[in-house]
Each structure stands twice: as structure tokens, then as C-alpha cells.
Image (spheres, helix red, strand yellow):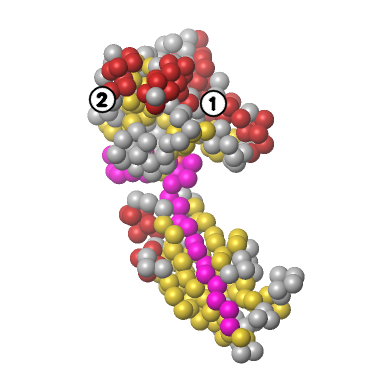
Amino acid sequence: MGYNIGEVTGYGGGPSDWSLTVDLTDPSATTVSGDFDVVSLLTGGSTGEADDYSIIGTSANFDSYTDNFVLNADGTFSFDIDRAAVFASDANQTVSFTILGTSGGQSDDDQVSVTLLICVARGTAIRTANGRRPVETLQPGDWIPTLDNGSQPIRWIGSRLLEAEELRRNPQWHPIRIKAGALGRGRPRRDLRVSPQHRVLLSDWRAQLFFGEDEILVPAKGLVDGQKIRWEQEDSEIEYFHILFDTHQVIYTEGSLTESFHPTGFSLRGVAPDARAELLALFPELDEDDGTYGPAAKYVAKVQEGLFMTQTAAV
């Protein structure tokens, strides 16, 4: 074959499979578009248009999550993302279609796959009084169901963005990935990424056997088993969010129970300076005595206790 058709606007992949990821936590992410040309097998550069382009197949779910698909004679294509349908599905979705280009009596088919993400690090779903929402869309005053005290209004929400270079210098800040179902059926519902010190609620036999408690909070890095719960090693940007109530609470995060922000001297050091100033303006007493906020909602296990429990339970 003397030629290949290829997507020329920057999709990853090739020469026959092309991929794109769209983060739907960005409200402006509403359409997908691209352009196919005839490309040189030697240089990969465009050599013009094919005589004809056509669609010869789509994934079974393509029509469920897209609208208004258009393929033009010059190889450009576009479609709208049915954002409501993707969010209603409560899961990331990958849709694909196969395009056939014909030129000079020769043909080449390529597949385009588009992953529609509703759950990325900053898009962690929090249960609210009005359904699940990505954490970055929450605001002070939003009502959040808690495990023990009904719905409570958010008093403050902050975040800290860690860039790849900062994570490279400080690998201890890499996120912990808790795989779907690692804590029990549907807990979490999807893979959950949290900061290493973020505490997760356990209410199974381990809490009773090792601590004599019905429920305990364990720092995520104290639950690492290298399989279902593990450190992420990639130096890729991540943003950690802090949700604060009037008192420490346990909330529903991707179907699992995790803690809200508990401001102490240690945890306050992990808050960006501007956010810390905002927090202390709301709770000025913390600037004088970080113990005035109140106790933790549950018994809190130390990291080493959690690791001992995790390692012993695995034997």
C-alpha cells in the first residue's frame, strides 16, 4: 500500500488507531473534532486529501453518548458530547468510530477512540444533597450528607495543585490509588485517588480485631497493599481538595467513606498559603491554637498501625 490516512490535528496513536481523552469536569468540553488527510508513510506529513472518506462503523455505545456527528468531504469531522448522558451513566465512557479513506484506488481504515472522563483526580465524585458532584464544583454553603450528623453545609473548600516537578522532588506526596471495590462491594465505586494522609473509614472485622472499634479512620498510606491499594509512581500533576465543616465529618466519596478536612498543625502545613489565610480568616482561633477545632469524628489509627494491620491481615 502506497499511502495511509491519518489524523493530523494532534490525536495520539497511529498509524491505524487514534485516541483522545476529554475531561468532562471542564464545562467547556462539549465537542470533539479532527481532520484526516493522506499522510506520507515515510515522514508522517500530510500529502493532501483522499478522494473519499466514509464511516464504516461505530462502537455500540456511540449514539448513546454523542450527537450531531458530521464527516465532511475534506476529512474533517465533529460531534457533540452528550454530557448529560455520560454523567447519568455514572462512569467514564469510551466511544469509537472507524473511518475509511479511499484514494487512487487504494483504501485505508483507521479507528478513532475518544475517552470521556467524569472521574479524574480533581473530578472525584462527592455525594451531595442533590446527587453526586465533582469535588471542584462544590462551594461553601453546599449541603453534604454525612455518616453521623445528617447533611451539613460546607464552611470552606480549598485545594492545592502539585505539579509534576514538585512531585518528582517530593515522591511522598504522590497520590494513593484505591481500586474499585478494594474496601468492599462498591467501595469505592470507581478507582479513587487521595493524598497519602487522607483518612479512610474501615468498619469491617479489621477494626474490631486490631483496634476493638466498630469504625476507624486510617490514613490511606497505611492501607497500601501493593495490589488493590497502591502508591502511584507517575510524576503527573494532581490537585488535592480540602472540604471543611463546622466539625469533623465522614462523607461519601466515590461510594466510600472518607474524612473531611481536620485542621491541625500538620494538616494546615499542607494547605497553600492563600487558602490557609482564607481558612484562618473563617476560623481565626486556629491561628492561636490548632486544637480548638475539635476532635476527630472516629478513632484514628496511625500510619504504622494501619500498615501492621494491612500486612498481618494479608498473611
Q: Is residue 147 left or right of residue 190?
A: left
Above or below: residue 206 compared with residue 21: above
Mark 1 sits on what residue?
Answer: 271
Mark 1 residue crowding within 10 angstroms, few (<14) / some (14–19) / many (20+): many
> Which quadrant would the N terminus be assigned to in this image?
bottom right
Q: Is residue 299 left or right of residue 54?
A: left
Which amino acid type is marked by label 2?
Answer: Asp
Residue furthest bottom as drawn: 105
Give the residue displayed 52% in from the left and 56% down from the top: 21
- Which residues lie in the magenta part? 107-133
Name the element at disc 2: loop
Mark 2 sits on what residue?
Answer: 148
> Quarter-wise, where is residue 255 in the image?
top left
Which amino acid type is marked by label 1?
Answer: Val
Q: Is residue 282 visible?
A: no
Q: Position of residue 132 (x, y in %)?
A: 33, 43
Give the residue displayed 46% in from the left and 29% down from the top: 224
Q: Position of residue 218 (x, y in %)?
A: 40, 22
Q: Position of residue 248 (x, y in %)?
A: 36, 21
Mark 2 residue crowding within 10 angstroms, few (<14) / some (14–19) / many (20+): few
- Secondary structure mainly formed by the magenta segment: strand
The magenta stretch spans residue 126? yes
Above or below: residue 94 compared with residue 91: below
Name the element at disc 1: loop
